């Protein structure tokens, strides 16, 4: 679920890319990187493991000169967490290309083999992003004209869309030519484009994973880059767009709205905040209708994604809403931490129970989703220690029963608490007195309400249906 950004400007872009990555930090905490093109058409790059604020210091920012560049925050799902796999990646031929990628390729092994056998290209890491970059470079190598055109670039992207499968939203730069971006033919991973006009009348463009990056920098959101679409912005500021997929579909990732995206983002014309409010309204109505037997004293969210959801549930069922769990904001998001042991260790450091809100009360806890059950089990245990009489748990998402192959770190059914289990089995494992899940149709209804044109979401973690049709 990495975060990407690219800016084609008329002023230095280093600080703007840094600021954009900072607000996209929730999409990846493992590594960060920035690449820029300076006035001498040389690539300048800095990338390393760590948070944005730790990877870049003053000397790095001064080094990253140029009016065009791309940035990346990594959340590793394919490959390792080695610093060598931090993005952007770079190849020097043809022209010199740097690329940053959000998503996951489902036929990476086949592609790696094909690159070596047909193009003699060596992949130096286990990252599928490097494979994607080399496929693009291989296609661009067919054009011997030293001056690339937009048609050349779109032809190359069309060719790779026919060969690679999975989820991918990409930004990149071609030395001496311009900035490009493209989104996979199913539109699984998000990508938006924005523009700002300077006082001298010049236009600058930004492409990013979420609209919040545009808001922070004063760019106006133009629109989402559509499924299969590619964008090319020359180093002179001229912009070109073209559909580069043979049969584009629109299947945005449903889990973006449940958990990953920031609430102040707009993705595929849907306000993430409004979608979460509707999730709470629908789930609250279900609880009021089907769970009247529960004697709930108070509704408490498991911060932070579920706060807006819990507030609506409390309003609908007519119970007080309280912030009973205090979050240490200096601990990262446990779902995207590397390794189960690290996640388990961090939960107690991340949350603390406010005993005054739990003592001798029947509590309805609200979470956005339950993946491995690690957080749920430990929080319920913590709440009982704080004196709760009964602990109920409501999830704004359905049971997560299947692996994700499109960029979420849910690679194995063995890690999923809901796999092969009924709801009551899950309830017993996490030691809840009642466990309530949102229905998938209700979740889709909550998100789709703002954009009825979306006919099918990528919801494989819930229903096991993989929209690329290449996963068994």
Image: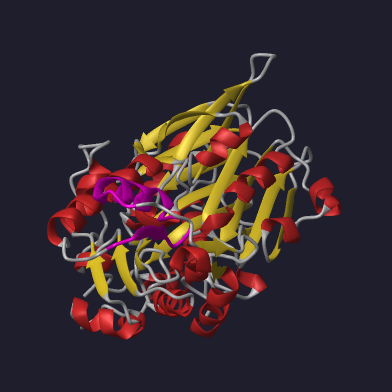
The residue at the point 45 percent across, 75 percent down is 387
The residue at the point 25 percent across, 71 percent down is 435
- Horizontal and vertical percent position of residue 33: 66, 57
Residue 311 visible in this rendered orientation of the protein: yes
Instruction: Answer above or below: position of 354 versus 262.
Output: below
Please identify the residue farthest to the front as the structure is shown. 360
The residue at the point 31 percent across, 74 percent down is 403
Which of the pair 426/95 is nearer the observer?
A: 426
Residue 146 visible in this rendered orientation of the protein: no
Instruction: Answer above or below: position of 325 versus 472.
Output: above
> In the rendered view, does 85 fall on the left or right side of 266?
right
What's the magenta region? Answer: 296-319
Please identify the residue farthest to the top as the structure is shown. 200
- Horizontal and vertical percent position of residue 132: 47, 61
The residue at the point 28 percent across, 67 percent down is 461
- Horizontal and vertical percent position of residue 306: 40, 56
Which of the pair 344/216 is nearer the observer?
A: 344
Which of the pair 189/350 is nearer the observer?
A: 350
Residue 467 position by quadrant:
bottom left
């Amino acid at each position: 679920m990495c975060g990407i950004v690219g800016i084609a400007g008329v002023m230095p872009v280093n600080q703007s890319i840094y600021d954009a990555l900072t607000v996209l930090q929730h999409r990846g905490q493992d590594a960060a990187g920035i690449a820029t093109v300076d006035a001498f058409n040389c690539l300048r790059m800095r990338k390393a493991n760590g948070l944005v604020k730790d990877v870049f210091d003053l000397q790095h920012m001064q080094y990253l000169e140029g009016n065009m560049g791309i940035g990346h925050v990594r959340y590793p799902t394919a490959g390792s967490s080695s610093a060598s796999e931090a993005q952007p990646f770079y190849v020097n031929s043809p022209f010199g290309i740097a690329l940053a990628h959000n998503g996951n390729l489902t036929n990476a092994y086949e592609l790696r083999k094909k690159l070596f056998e047909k193009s003699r290209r060596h992949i130096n890491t286990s990252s599928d992003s490097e494979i994607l970059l080399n496929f693009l470079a291989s296609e661009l190598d067919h054009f011997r004209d030293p001056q690339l055109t937009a048609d050349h670039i779109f032809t190359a992207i069309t060719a790779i869309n026919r060969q690679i499968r999975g989820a991918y939203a990409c930004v990149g730069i071609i030395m001496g030519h311009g900035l490009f971006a493209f989104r996979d033919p199913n539109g699984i991973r998000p990508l938006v484009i924005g523009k700002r006009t300077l006082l001298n009348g010049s236009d600058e463009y930004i492409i990013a994973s979420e609209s919040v990056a545009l808001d922070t920098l004063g760019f106006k959101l133009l629109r989402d880059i559509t499924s299969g679409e590619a964008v090319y912005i020359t180093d002179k500021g001229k912009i070109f767009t073209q559909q580069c997929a043979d049969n584009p579909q629109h299947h945005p990732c449903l889990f973006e709205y449940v958990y990953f995206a920031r609430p102040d983002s707009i993705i595929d014309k849907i306000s993430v905040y409004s979608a979460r409010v509707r999730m709470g309204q629908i789930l609250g109505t279900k609880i009021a209708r089907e769970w009247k037997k529960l004697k709930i004293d108070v509704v408490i969210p498991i911060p932070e994604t579920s706060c807006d959801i819990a507030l609506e549930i409390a309003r609908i069922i007519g119970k007080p809403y309280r912030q009973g769990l205090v979050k240490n904001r200096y601990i990262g998001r446990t779902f995207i931490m590397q390794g189960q042991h690290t996640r388990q260790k961090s939960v107690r450091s991340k949350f603390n129970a406010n005993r005054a809100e739990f003592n001798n009360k029947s509590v309805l806890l609200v979470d956005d989703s339950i993946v491995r059950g690690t957080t749920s089990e430990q929080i319920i245990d913590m709440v009982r220690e704080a004196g709760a009489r009964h602990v109920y748990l409501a999830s704004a998402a359905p049971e997560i029963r299947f692996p994700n192959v499109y960029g979420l770190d849910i690679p194995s059914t063995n890690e999923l608490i809901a796999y092969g289990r009924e709801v009551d089995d899950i309830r017993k494992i996490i030691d809840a007195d009642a466990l309530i899940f949102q229905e998938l149709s209700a979740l889709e209804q909550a998100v789709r309400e703002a954009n009825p044109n979306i006919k099918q979401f990528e919801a494989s973690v819930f229903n096991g249906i993989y929209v690329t049709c290449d996963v068994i």
